[in-house]
Image (spheres, rainbow, N blue to C red):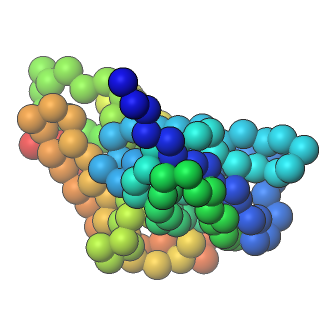
């Protein structure tokens, strides 16, 4: 048995995080989540297998951004972590009557570029997920089993009304 040695990513902060700033990593398929730890040397990922990833930076008042990076066998990489203030955008999911939808991930895109994700309680009639977004046009996508839904919306200089994603 030979284990493939990967590497880690060290974050170079560009801007000042606040207490609500969250850092984590997802694989290129956005199916696995990995942690970011803080040590005396700064913020860095846990050891990752060789491959492609996104560094996700987000928070209620931090603009969501997904920075792509690649881990090569035996190499560590430095990833810029841009931190910008933003207004929170709330989301809710509307499922068909009788559908069992619990917590779902809302994937967010600017054009075709993945920028982040928020979690929404599918059993709540009100907005339950929120994420900071910079001004611009976005698309929110949800997949819950066989159900799918998306919504387009624009973020302005202030927080807008909750965005509803209807699952069909």
What residue is at 58 percent from the left and 57 percent from the top? 75
The total number of labels drawn is 0
The answer to whether residue 115 is left or right of residue 15 is left
- Percent of width and height locating residue 4: 43, 39
Residue 42 seen in the current view: yes
- Percent of width and height locating residue 55: 54, 56
What residue is at 26 percent from the left and 60 percent from the top? 151
The quarter of the picture where the C terminus appears is top left
Quadrant of the rendered image containing residue 45: top right
In the displayed structure, 163 sits above or below 40; it is below
30, 144: nearer the viewer: 30
In the displayed structure, 52 sits above or below 138; it is above
The answer to whether residue 32 is left or right of residue 19 is left
- Percent of width and height locating residue 111: 32, 77
The quarter of the picture where the N terminus appears is top left
What residue is at 82 percent from the left and 64 percent from the top? 16
The answer to whether residue 41 is left or right of residue 84 is right
Quadrant of the rendered image containing residue 139: bottom left
What residue is at 76 percent from the left and 50 percent from the top? 43
Residue 162 seen in the current view: no
Check the image and name the residue furthest to the front: 1
- Percent of width and height locating residue 142: 26, 46
The answer to whether residue 153 is left or right of residue 143 is right
In the displayed structure, 80 sits above or below 99; it is below
Check the image and name the residue furthest to the right: 40
Quadrant of the rendered image containing residue 144: top left
């Amino acid at each position: 048995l030979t284990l493939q040695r990967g590497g880690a990513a060290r974050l170079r902060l560009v801007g000042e995080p606040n207490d609500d700033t969250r850092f984590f990593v997802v694989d290129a398929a956005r199916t696995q989540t990995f942690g970011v730890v803080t040590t005396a040397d700064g913020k860095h990922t846990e050891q990752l297998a060789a491959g492609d990833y996104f560094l996700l930076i987000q928070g209620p008042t931090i603009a969501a951004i997904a920075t792509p990076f690649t881990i090569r066998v035996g190499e560590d990489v430095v990833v810029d972590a841009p931190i910008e203030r933003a207004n929170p955008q709330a989301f809710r999911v509307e499922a068909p009557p009788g559908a069992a939808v619990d917590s779902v991930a809302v994937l967010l895109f600017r054009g075709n570029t993945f920028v982040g994700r928020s979690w929404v309680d599918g059993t709540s009639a009100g907005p339950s997920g929120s994420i900071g977004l910079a001004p611009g046009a976005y698309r929110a996508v949800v997949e819950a089993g066989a159900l799918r839904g998306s919504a387009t919306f624009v973020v302005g200089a202030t927080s807008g009304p909750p965005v509803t994603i209807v699952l069909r």
